[in-house]
Image: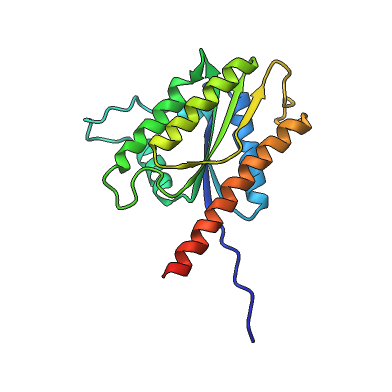
Amino acid sequence: MPTDKPVFSPLIIGIGGTARPQSTSERAVAEALSSAEKLDARIRLFDGDFVSRMPLYLPDRSHRTSDEIEFIDAVRRCDGVIVGTPGYHGSLSGPIKNMLDIIEDTARDERPYLEGRAFGCIVTAYGWQACGTTLVSLRMIAHALRAWPTPFGAAINTSSPPFNPDGTCIDEAVSKQLSIVAAQVVEFARFRHAGMAAAE
């Protein structure tokens, strides 16, 4: 008797946050990952504390810290990523860019960079102009890393705080944006997995 195949549970990693604990960008990525988890994805968050303690990426430095090794290992295993950044002076923050730069360590892998994986973009900024320019920058970086930016990118104007102090999202429109990003990353991962399985 035929049985239903188990649902593929992709590993989605989230990268986001600042040195300020529970920053809006960190909360936004955590909210998106929560939505992905509800879709039966496995999740891993690299939060603001992790992002802030990462050393500056130096391509010629042979030694890697335990944090760097942990992050690159997760990148190699993941099926999709969700990246959240504040908009600083028209572009993404330095620490988030540093996290993305270290993915260069995978350049000589059989599956380099983020090839074949969806890249969900989330931007938080105090004003719409910085949201727009930073979202464009993040999408360009995704292309450079051979990832597939999701059709929808979340832009969150923090002039009206979207989260309660406990981290609960209180803005229905923001919550919907984040769930769309999560759903598109998970959906792409499942489509690709199904396609690869069919080709075997």
Q: Quadrant of the N terminus?
A: bottom right
User: Which is nearer the eye, 150 or 83?
Assistant: 150
Question: Extreme top residue here?
Answer: 89
Query: Which residue occupies 51% across, 15% down?
Result: 90
- Colour scheme: rainbow
Name the residue rendered at 38%, 42% in the picture. 72
Q: Is residue 156 above or below residue 105?
A: above
Place of residue 132 in the rendered image (x, y in percent of width and height, measured from the top left): 58, 22
Q: Is residue 107 left or right of residue 122?
A: left
Q: Position of residue 97 (x, y in %)?
A: 42, 26
Q: Position of residue 99 (x, y in %)?
A: 41, 31
From the image, which quarter does the C terminus lie in?
bottom left
Give above or below for 182 relative to 134.
below
Nearest the eye: 117 or 37: 117
Q: Position of residue 46 (x, y in %)?
A: 50, 36
Please determine whether, in this image, residue 87 is positioned above or below residue 14: above
At x 41%, y 32%, the residue is: 100
- Residue 177 visible (yes or no): yes
Q: Hey, which quadrant is residue 146 in on the image?
A: top left
Q: Quadrant of residue 107?
A: top left
Left-right relation of 56 to 165:
left
Q: Is residue 29 above or below residue 41?
A: above
- How many labels, in total? 0
**Picture quadrant of residue 8:** bottom right
Outermost residue on the bottom side: it is 1
**Looking at the image, which residue is at 50% across and 60% down?**
193
Q: Is residue 20 visible?
A: no
